[in-house]
Image: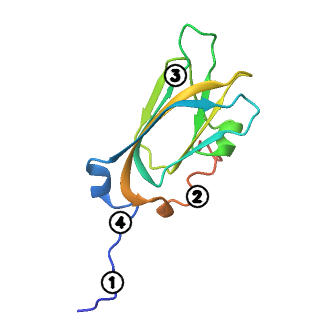
Amino acid sequence: MSNSFKYTYGLGHVPSFQTSCRPWLSSSIEVPASGSTPLEITFDSVSRFIIITNTTPIDEPSRTLRFGMSEAGVEGTNYGTLQNGQSFEAEFKVTRVYLMSDSAAASSASVIAGLTGIGAEHLPSNWSGSSGVG
């Protein structure tokens, strides 16, 4: 029997996305105003899911939050938006999330992610921000 084959986890490893994941949480994130460089949140592993919340209080003036999977997407036209107090949840395989306020005022956010055992190096470019990819 050959010892040259070494099994490794990768993006197609289904059990990595079926089991419980390692939690990653950050709150009170200061999100830069529109026109600034988007804030990059990085993970050391590929995510199984993400939850992004615009934590700007609902009784304050509207500070819409842009979010996407690439800097180009958030700066361009490939991003999602959240109003004060709103959340977004999705099962995405990502290693980075980008945040930027959609107004001249900074906003705040929290990010929760479930991380798999698949290292970030298996998804080195995350997403491009082109062809409808955020």
- Mark 4 highlights which residue? 9
Location of residue 21 in the rendering, given as x and y in whole percent from the top left corner: 31, 48
Task: Answer with the quarter of the image where residue 79 lies.
Answer: top right
Dot 4 crowding, Cα within 10 Å, few <14, some 14–19, many 20+ = some
Residue under the image location 48 percent in, 35 percent down: 111
Q: Nearer the viewer, residue 128 or 106?
A: 106
Quadrant in the picture for residue 65: top right
Disc number for residue 125: 2
User: Mark 1, residues whose alpha carbon is within 10 Å: few (<14), some, or many (≥20)?
Assistant: few
Q: Which mark is residue 5?
A: 1
Quarter residue 71 falls in: top right
What residue did someone put label 3 on?
55
Residue at horizontal 58%, vertical 26%?
Answer: 108
Helix, strand or loop at mark 4: loop
- CA gap between label 3 and label 2 equals 28 Å
Which residue extends farthest bottom?
1
